[in-house]
Structure formats: C-alpha cells, structure tokens
Image (spheres, rainbow, N blue to C red):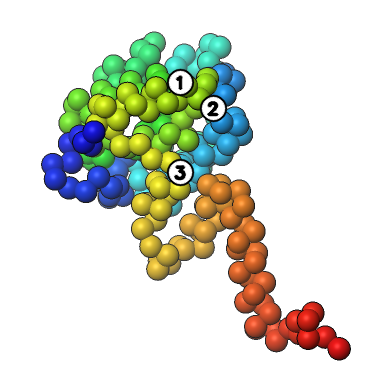
Amino acid sequence: MTPANFNGQKPMIDPNDAVLLLIDHQSGLFQLVHDMPMTTLRTHATVLAKMATLAKIPVITTASVPQGPNGPLIPEIHKYAPHAQYVPRKGEINAWDNPEFVAAVKATGRSTLIIAGTVTSVCMAFPAISAVADGFKVFAVIDASGTYSKMAQEISLARVVQAGVVPLDMAAVTAEIQHTWNRDDAMEWANLWSGVFTEYPLLMESYQKAQDVVTNQETLDSQRA
C-alpha cells in the first residue's frame, strides 16, 4: 500500500511539521490491554510526551468520557508535556468527529500527525483513517497504542495501512525525530531511549565504565599481579 498524502516525498517524519495526538490513554481503558504489558504501554506513552517536549512538537490530547469507567488520562502525559492542549469531547467515539479536536489540530498549521491511542482498533485507527481522508500525512505508533489481543492489533494494523497510514514503533519514531546524535541535547535523548529499550541504560553504563578505565588508567583484572 502507498502512504497517503506524501505527494512523492519520502514518508518520514519532519519534526517541524509534526503534531503528536495522544488519544484516550486512560487508566480504565489500559485494563483492556493484552497485546503488550500495560506497564510498557504506559512507559511508551510517557516517552512520547517527553519526546514532544524535547523536540518542541505540539501535543493534543483527548479522552473518552473520562468521568466514567474509561477513567482519566494517565497523569504522566501532561506532566511531561506541560504544553499539551487537552480537548474534551462530547461523547464522540472517533476523536476526529469532534469539531473542536479537528480545529485544534488544524490551528497548529502542521500537516503531519503522529497518533497513538487506546484501544488501537478504535481510538487510534478511527482518527488516523479520518485524518488521512482529510489530507493529512499520518504516522501511527503501534506500540504506544494498546488493544485487547494480538489478533485485534494485527487487524487494526492492516486496516490503517490500507487507508494510507504509516505504521511505526517507538524506536522508529524516536530515531526519526532525534535525527542525529550530533546535537547539544544528545544526553537528554540518550536518557529518553531508556524508556524505549529498558536495557539501554546497561549500554550507557558499559560505555561509561570503558571511558573511566581509560581516563583513570585503571589496571585490568587480567593484568593484576
């Protein structure tokens, strides 16, 4: 399938044209997630919020009847993206059916959407497909969206791809937005990667130890008398 609305451009994220939409990452809905550990989903949503702040990407959030059983948005999102704009809905299941939500997206003046939502087949897929139909370039972060089964995830992935949405995972979205390690805030990005790969701090520790051995002229155990 061909990604929609790129008009011959390569289908990759331009941070200067991107908006992050975090849809229905709510404590009640998180209890339905079984295609990945709930803690992983929560961490990934938090990393996206931190990433948007670091990259100065606008963030728009919304929730589905948060005063009911779906529960409130997880607090980490607005904690780590304090610039995020929350748009309340009047019961619409598809966030894109809410005129205020669409108006907030269009007000950014940006045409590339990075979308994650819970559950994947509804809260991510419906607005992603709708935004494509409205002419936006849409990327869906699959492992920052959760659903009730692996089958549901696979069906939803097939559906959005057929509509022209570009699927990606947390590693891809982080790397595309970071773009290079040759930047003044490289250490902040390195810390961000620990939320993408929980093992990443071990790499950082190993690297730091190797540097310390050289700097401190530490004697190797194999060379001790």
Disc 3/disc 2 C-alpha distance (Å): 15 Å
Number of on-image labels: 3
Q: Is residue 19 above or below residue 185?
A: above
Amino acid type, label 3: Met
Q: Residue furthest left?
A: 7
Kindly identify which numbered label has been placed on residue 10. Answer: none
Q: Nearer the viewer, mark 3 or mark 2?
A: 2
Q: Picture coordinates of residue 178 (x, y %)?
A: 39, 56
Disc 3/disc 1 C-alpha distance (Å): 19 Å
Amino acid type, label 2: Asp
Nearer-N-terminus badge (2/1): 2
Disc 2/disc 1 C-alpha distance (Å): 8 Å
Quick check: 165 left or right of 63? left
Crowd band around label 3 with a 10 angstrom C-alpha radius: few (<14), some (14–19), many (20+): many
Q: Picture coordinates of residue 123 (x, y %)?
A: 40, 21
Instruction: Tell me the quarter of the picture where residue 110 sits.
Output: top left
Kindly identify which numbered label has been placed on residue 35. Answer: 2
Amino acid type, label 1: Ala
Nearer-N-terminus badge (3/2): 2
Q: Are marks 2 and 1 in contact (CB under 8 Å)?
A: yes
Name the residue that disc number 3 marks: 170
Nearer-N-terminus badge (3/1): 1
Query: Residue sitting at 31 percent across and 27 percent down?
Result: 160
Instruction: Tell me the quarter of the picture where residue 43 sits.
Output: top right
Name the residue that disc number 1 marks: 152
Work out which quarter of the rendered image holds the N terminus and state it: top left
